Image (cartoon, grey):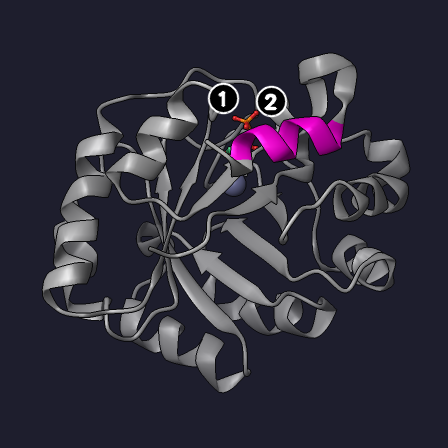
Amino acid sequence: MKKIKISPSILSADFSQLGNEIKRLEDGGADMIHVDVMDGHFVPNLTIGPPVIKALRDYTKLPFDVHLMISPVHKYIKNYAEAGADIITLHPEATENLKETINHVKKLGKKVGVSLNPNTKIDIIKNFLSEINLVLIMSVHPGFGGQKFIPDVLEKVKELKKIKDQQSLNFDIEIDGGINFDNSKLAIKAGANILVSGTTIFKNNNGNIKKNIDILKTS
Ligand code: DX5
Ligand code: ZN
């Protein structure tokens, strides 16, 4: 059983203090930093891009788990790799050639993830599972923090975990969106080993980040 890792989403952080917020997450026991990049086109929201990631890079040694909700994605991958991303996760719908984009990320020396929206089936990535480091299962429709968890996606996590075990593959299963202290247990039981959380980590227990990360870790 893989160790449960926590990847707090800075989408719920104080954007006027992002550097200090990242330090708070590291001090609070985060395993990596989930950076939600949105372009206002692939999703109806606009957040940050490579210059901000570059500016944040030296605030922590933790891996930057960069979730690209942008389209087209292929031509921008290099910008995020050079800005300091460690894991680059993209949506299959955002590229014309998923194999080519996966290889592009790997050639840049970065880990590559593929993200499935709630209505997207595993089928479209089945042939790539041995080539990627991570599958990001969206448990909300991407674009905003603070949304309600969609429990139906747990079946997808279970199906993915079954394939992973049957084929002795090693990719991480990360779940993202509406994760709280109750559904985190269900997500882990279904087979997720990385939990993304923004609202629960930044807002619960009067914003006690360490306490919130500890509770999620011991789900
Ligand atoms: C949504 C993002 C998620 C979101 C998680 O499009 O991909 O990472 O910020 O935030 P919460 O935990 O508040 O749902
Ligand atoms: Zn995300």
Q: Amino acid at mark 1?
A: Asn
Instruction: Say if residue 140 shows up in the picture.
Output: no
- The structure residue drawn at horizontal position 30% and vertical position 67%, both measured from the top left corner, is 98
Under circle 2, the secondary element is helix
Query: Can you tell which mark lies on residue 180?
Result: 1
Majority secondary structure in the magenta region: helix
Which residue does the numbered mark 2 point to in the structure image? Answer: 200
Mark 2 CB near ligand 1 (8 Å cut): yes
Residue drawn at point x = 28 percent, y = 36 percent: 189
In the image, 193 versus 128, the foreground residue is 193
Whether tag 2 and tag 1 are in contact, CB under 8 A, the answer is yes
Region rendered in magenta: 209-216
When the figure is inspected, residue 162 is found, relative to residue 154, above or below; the finding is below
Quadrant location, the N terminus:
bottom left
Residue visible at 12% across and 53% down? 123
Depth order, front residue of 108/188: 188
Residue beneath the point at 17% across and 33% down: 155
Q: CA distance from mark 2 to mark 1?
A: 6 Å
Provide residue 133's location: percent of width, then percent of height.
39, 67
> Residue 59 at x, y = what percent?
86, 57
Q: Position of residue 211 (x, y in %)?
A: 69, 27
